[in-house]
Image (cartoon, rainbow, N blue to C red):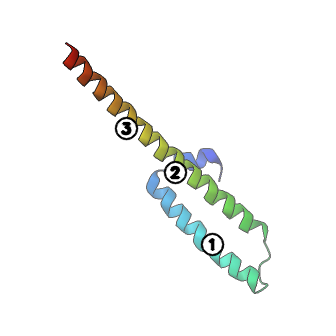
Amino acid sequence: MKPADVRALDDDRLDRRIEELLGEWRTLRFQEAVGQLTATSRIRQIRKDIARIKTVQTEREIELELEALVQNRTNADRQIAEVSS
């Protein structure tokens, strides 16, 4: 998945996609352990996709926290202005 594709998904879909990828990753790891895996590069690709998704989720969490801080700051500034008047 490309980063732009990941960013286009909503939070619920990102969570479901991680679960799907983790399931596929477990299956591939098992196949690798028993010597049945032929596409070894797929494991690496899945790990990178999971990392991309988690990065986008973290970006969104930070963005929400910043918005809350800005809102709190704005409210505090208003209260100070009211008290000063």
Q: Is residue 3 left or right of residue 80?
A: right
- Say which of marks 2 and 1 sits in front: 2
Q: Which residue is mark 1?
A: 24
Which mark is drawn over residue 68? 3
From the viewer's side, name the closer residue of 36 and 59. 59
**Identity of the residue drawn at 58% across and 73% down:** 23
Number of the front mark, 3 or 2: 3
Spatial CA distance of label 3 from label 2 is 17 Å
- Using residue 66 as the reference point, say whether residue 45 is left or right of it: right
| Rendered-image quadrant of the C terminus | top left
Image-quadrant location for residue 84? top left
| Residue position for label 2 | 57
For the residue labelled by badge 1, is the local secondary structure a helix, a strand or a loop?
A: helix
Q: Which mark is residue 14?
A: none
Residue in view at x 61 percent, y 60 percent: 50
The amino acid type of the residue labelled 2 equals: Gln
Near mark 3 (Cα within 10 A), the count class, few <14, some 14-19 or many ≥20, is few
Instruction: Give the Cα separation between the discs numbered 2 and 1.
Output: 20 Å
Toward the front, the furthest residue is 84
Q: Which amino acid type corresponds to the residue marked 1 in the rendered image?
A: Glu
Q: Position of residue 7 (x, y in %)?
A: 55, 46
Tell me the crowding category of disc 1: few under 14, some 14 to 19, or many 20 or more residues within 10 angstroms, Cα based.
some
Question: For the residue carrying disc 2, how many other residues have a C-alpha within 10 Å: few (<14), some (14-19), or many (20+)?
Answer: some
Looking at this view, name the residue that lies furthest to the bottom: 34
